[in-house]
Amino acid sequence: MEVEARRIRRFGPQRPTHRTLLPLHASSSSHNVSNTVSCWYCDYKISMFNRPLFHFGRRYSRFFKVWFSIGVGFALSALLGVTLILLWELARTLHLCGGSNKLGSFANTLFFGFPSLLPGLSLTLADAGYICVSTVISVVVHEFGHAVAATSEGIQIEYIAIFIAILFPGALVAFNYELLQTSPHLTALRVYSAGIWHNAVCCAACGLALFLLPMILFPFYSSGDSPMVLNVPPTSPLSGYLAPGDVILSVDNVPIRNAQEWLKLNTLTYNVKLNNVNVSQRSGELVVNKMKGYCIPNFMMEESKITELLETQRACPSELTAFVKSLCSANVTLDDGQSKIDLLSRGRSMYCLNAKDVIKHKRCGDDWGPATTKGGGCTCSQDEFCLAPVQEPGLVWIEIAYSSPHECLSHVQNRFPFSETSGVKETNCGGVFIFVGDVISMARSIQLTSYQPRWGPHIVAYFPNLLERILIWTFHVSLALALLNGLPVYFLDGESILDETLSHFSSLSPRKKKKVLRLCLLCGSLISLIVCFRELL
């Protein structure tokens, strides 16, 4: 979080309206760097950039005055917007309004700077690195805005400082406050609003870069085909199934075009499949409705049928998977209130089959979605029956098709000695394997990229993902920095912006303006603390 040094308040008599602010030369110092250390505060001051920034700001002063005047409008809008959000969040905290959570992710970004994460997902070490890099970028952009706005108005820069106050890091630009105090209120507003405005522009630049990234990388990378695997950690459920360089083609025969579709489709599959499983008892057999199934010949069913099972025994041997009959079009429901687990524990008419052999047959069932190109549907031939795999609560059965462009596999099954509930179907340069488990954790356990290098070593495949993650995190951190500094609280830019706004747009006396300012800052700070604690709890 970037923290601005508190500005000198101005409640004195009316200042003259005509005064020359432009010095002949920027201030110089024999020491380009210095530092201050105390028990609760330490900083690192840099003055070597004073002269270049001063000449740069003065050279394009006309353009920058227009540029930062636009920033004033944005900063005032941000101040009003975050104030309304604070009031809304306070009303929710005090249960004065409905429990709508539409602004929840926005408030999360406002106070913590992180994009919304799925429950149970924690930040990785790589994410922490991205946050550090994006924070440095966002703070530099913010302080550069203040520095250029000041120099374009002829206000000297004393130094740029990086500091740590107690445990909170930050940065600031120290101005010649004597000149800033004598400047018109609109000039001061441009200087104080410049940081927020530059963070907003940084967000827009990151968003545009993300949108144009496929076009920017087109000469060196292809995109929009299928995501490529960058890394499979040993702890991933897919370790041994996929390897770096493999390309994921589809999930349940639904084509996957990029890494985002991989995550969205698996999340959707998890939510839909768990809510559409019905098991009924029909003619002494277990029947599963609205599930994925395969058309299995009768002779395979008779050889693998189980009719008696003790409660302490497994339904099938470790190398086989349990299947039950499926009625994809019948609307059969439980009549006796028995649960799926209760019925399955009886072991009636269950079939133990090798998943590798099962997935070679035609699909059937109502839960394959668009996966009908391989003969899916509700109809099997007369000598076949639709069998669906038995799934434990919370587990989902999905087919994942992949290809290995750099290695044509002759014996895919030897590469995957992994799970008793998995099967692999060989193709020329890849295959199809079955995953049974928590698909959300599985999907997020591997690192994918939507860009495939046209040439070069494998390490160049990491560059688009690295650039994409930095842009995404910079967008969120820069947005949080802009909104935080727009808060009407002490020690942030919002304090100075509110002060100058009251001076410029109101006719209050200095004494009344001081009381109004203190009241607004006190209320804003207290409400911010209340909302922040609520988000943490």
Image: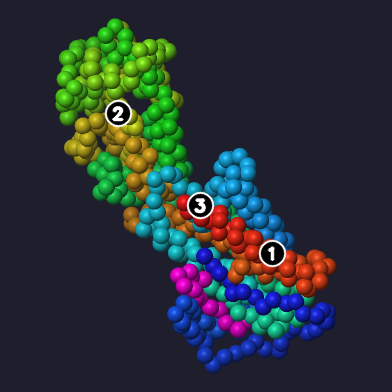
Identity of the amino acid at label 3?
A: Glu
Vertical arrangement, residue 151 with respect to residue 71, above or below: below
x, y (%) of residue 204?
60, 56
Name the residue: 57% across, 68% down: 141
Which is closer to the viewer, label 1 or label 3?
1
Residue position marked by numbered label 3 in the rendering: 535
Q: Do the residues labelled 1 and 3 touch (CB within 8 Å)?
A: no
Instruction: Measure how far apart labels 1 and 3 are at the Cα level.
Output: 24 Å
Instruction: Measure how far apart labels 2 and 3 are at the Cα level.
Output: 35 Å
Residue position marked by numbered label 2 in the rendering: 392
Which is closer to the viewer, label 1 or label 2?
1
Residue position marked by numbered label 1 in the rendering: 519
Q: Does the magenta stretch include residue 157?
A: yes
Give the magenta part as a residue range.
156-170
Viewed as shown, does residue 365 lie left or right of 314? right
| Picture quadrant where residue 22 is located | bottom right
Identity of the amino acid at label 2?
A: Glu
